[in-house]
Structure formats: C-alpha cells, structure tokens
Amino acid sequence: MTQPQSPRPAAERPINPAVHDSAFLKALRGEPASHTPVWFMRQAGRYMPEYRALRAGRSMLDCIRTPELAAEITLQPIKAMPLDAAILFNDILTPLPTMGLDLDFVGGVGPQIANPVSTTADVDRLGVPSTAETMPYTAESIRLLVPELNARGIPLIGFVGAPFTLASYAIEGKGSRNYERTKRFMYAEPAAWERLMGKFEAILADYLTEQVKAGASAVQIFDSWVGALSIYDYRTFVKPATSRLIERVKKLGVPVIYFGTGTTHLLPDMASLGTNIVGADWRLPLDQAWDLLESGQGIQGNLDPLLLQAPWRELRHQTDRILGEAAGRPGHVFNVGHGILPETPQAMVHRLTDYVHEQTQR
Ligand code: CP3
C-alpha cells in the first residue's frame, strides 16, 4: 500500500507521538492499526444531555466564537465515550459571515442567510478576508484543545465545507431539497459561478491552513450535498475548484478526508482527487464503495445513522456486516454515513463504539 510522501506539516509544534501513533491517524495513513478507529460525524450535538445543557440560552454562533465553549463542547463526547478522534465544534457555514453573508442559525429551522447571493454583482461583492483576522477564535479553540487531547492520545479533526456545498447555502439562503437556485445560477452564469468557486477555494484553503497550524492533525472536507449533481455537472462546474483546494490542503502535511452523501455515482471522481480517505454514505455496501476508490485509498463509513435508533440486535447485525465488508483491511475508519441524529440514544453510540473496538482488536 503506497501513500504519497507527506510534505512537512504546517503545524507550529511537532505532533505528539501518541497522537501520531493513534489508530485513527494510522488508518488515515493506510497503516495497520490496533483496532478499527471510530468517530461519528456530529458526535458533539443535541443527542447529548450535556450538550443541550451547555447550549441552553446560547446561540450556535456564540458557542463557536467563544473558544472556551467550543473546546468544552468538542471534549464532551470524548469524555463520555472511548472515541478515536475529536472533531472541532464549529460549523461549515462559519466563514460565510466573514464574506459578507448575514447568517443566523434559527432554532428548529436550521441556517438562514438574510442576503443570499442571487446576481453576479453579489458574487463580486463577497469578500475573501484573512481567516486569521476574521475567525481567530477557531485557532484559539484548537490551541486550547490540543494539550487536553494530547494527554489522551486523541487526534483533532479540523474541517471546512467544500465549495459546492457552501455555494448551495450562499445561493439558496438555507438548506434545500433540489438546489434549484444553485443549479440555475451555475448554468446561467458560468463565469460568475467559477469566480464564486474560486473565492471559496481561497478562503477554505486559508482557513484549513490556520486550523492545521494551530494543531489539527487531520482535516475533513464536507461536500454533503454534492451528490445532487450529475457526473457531468460535477466535472464541469465543481471538480476543478475542489481539486485545487485539495491540492493546496495536501501540502499542509496532514491526512485529508473528502466526504459527501448520495455520491454513489460520484465516488470514482471524488476518489480521483487523491485524498487519503473518501467518506461514503450507507447506500452502497462498504466493499463495493471501496472498490470504486483509488488503490491505497481508505474509506470512512458507512452505517446509516438511523440504525442508532434501531434495536441493538439490528444495529449489531449491520455493524457486523460492515466490518465483514471491510474485512480488517487497513484504511477503514468506522463512522456513520451522515451525522448522528438528535433523537439518537447516547447509550447506543457508546455501546456501538465499544462493540467496534472489541470486534476489531488485533
Ligand atoms: O461533527 C461534529 O460533531 C462537529 C460539529 C459540526 C456541526 N456542523 C455542528 C452543528 C460539523 C462538522 C458540522 C458540519 C455541517 N454543518 C454540515 C456538514 C455535515 C452534514 O451534516 O452534512 C452541514 C451541511 C452544516 C450546516 C448546518 N449546520 C445545518 C444544515 C444545520 C441545521 C440542522 C441541524 O441539525 O440543526 C446546522 C446546525 C448545527 N451544526 C448543529 C450542530 C451541533 C445543530 C444546532 C444546535 O445544536 O442547535
């Protein structure tokens, strides 16, 4: 299994040896590990009583922008369960306000942007400020977390949204089912669309650089909604900027995960961008998804998050199935195929984490 040689890490301090040798980072490098590492997208969230208690009366953005709170929320699932990686508490939409978009998280509704992009002039008005100046709280949160996580030998995942997924929020102004405005803009204004993709590429590369410098030891790029595109549209309108972003991020010297949902048809194209790991949802069996990736590339997934609300016998059966499909190959990171849902019983998340560890002990 050959992985390209990593360039020198951008991090301010050398990586902690226990973190470097963790099962999670070994899997990301394609090396055999003591067990299959487990973490969960949205592992810090409303399914945890301590998260709901801390969030009570505080806005999402306040928590993200207050390093002590962001660090504390990040650590909540780590303290409660033997997870193999922490993910910074933040959101993919955090950069949008710094570009001039008026974002709010409305309880029970989700993200809302008061002034979404609808014209080419709107694209040209979007700023690309330095993320060290506009989002200093992100690096500060990471600096608070790294000593705590180093003491536990737990790596920290930094992340951004991918250009298409962020553009879908910037243009729709909220979550969407069919991305009608986004696709209309993409087809009608290809030059402005390309400028928009370029602005996201620039700000996201800068933001991930800050996160790695501050101590993130892996990064994930969330392209959650890219599965809405045909292969042709992905290649024409989205892949070039995403590829440039990933090329820049690879130079930071930490492993990269590229994730999307509904992407069965796009997996070979996503894999061709050459990240260490590609994330897969539950629609394809893990081994069939893995067959679509590049040689030496690992996979993250791919339990349907709804199974965490099924009886234990069904959850265990399907976990066995996924572990059977992975067949102990290096490069498998156990995760849900999309984020943990708020109705999930925390005891099931804990039991599943223990179970994957027990079953994959090597
Ligand atoms: O994974 C983690 O534990 C880290 C934190 C994290 C959040 N959002 C916190 C959050 C991460 C990695 C994200 C990424 C994110 N945000 C994505 C990509 C992953 C995915 O789910 O596809 C997307 C599309 C968003 C945008 C977003 N943020 C939406 C659509 C919503 C509303 C839906 C919802 O679940 O409420 C959010 C809000 C949000 N981001 C919450 C959390 C914990 C819920 C807000 C709350 O707790 O009140």
Image (cartoon, helix red, strand yellow):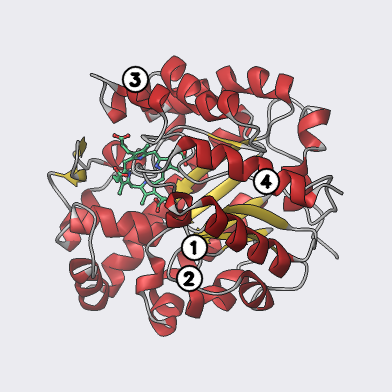
Give the structural element (helix, strand or loop) at label 4: helix
Q: Is residue 316 left or right of residue 329?
A: left
Q: Does the residue at mark 3 contact the one at mark 4 (Cβ under 8 Å)?
A: no
Q: Does the residue at mark 3 contact the one at mark 1 (Cβ under 8 Å)?
A: no
Residue at 26% in and 47% down: 126
User: Which image quadrant: the N terminus?
Assistant: bottom right
Residue at 80% in and 63% down: 329
Give the structural element (helix, strand or loop) at label 1: helix
Residue at 27% in and 20% down: 56
Residue 153 location in percent, x, y? 74, 28
Q: Earlier in the sequence, mark 3 or mark 4?
A: 3
Front label number (3 vs 1): 3
Residue designated by label 4 = 355
Residue 69 location in percent, x, y? 42, 18
Residue designated by label 1 = 242
Q: Is residue 129 left or right of residue 188?
A: right
The yes-or-no answer for disc 3 within 8 Å of ligand 1 is no
Of the pair 47 and 62, the residue shown nearer to us: 47
Q: Does the residue at mark 2 contact the one at mark 1 (Cβ under 8 Å)?
A: yes
Residue designated by label 2 = 239
Gap in Å between the C-alphas at discs 2 and 1? 5 Å
Q: Does the residue at mark 2 contact the one at mark 3 (Cβ under 8 Å)?
A: no
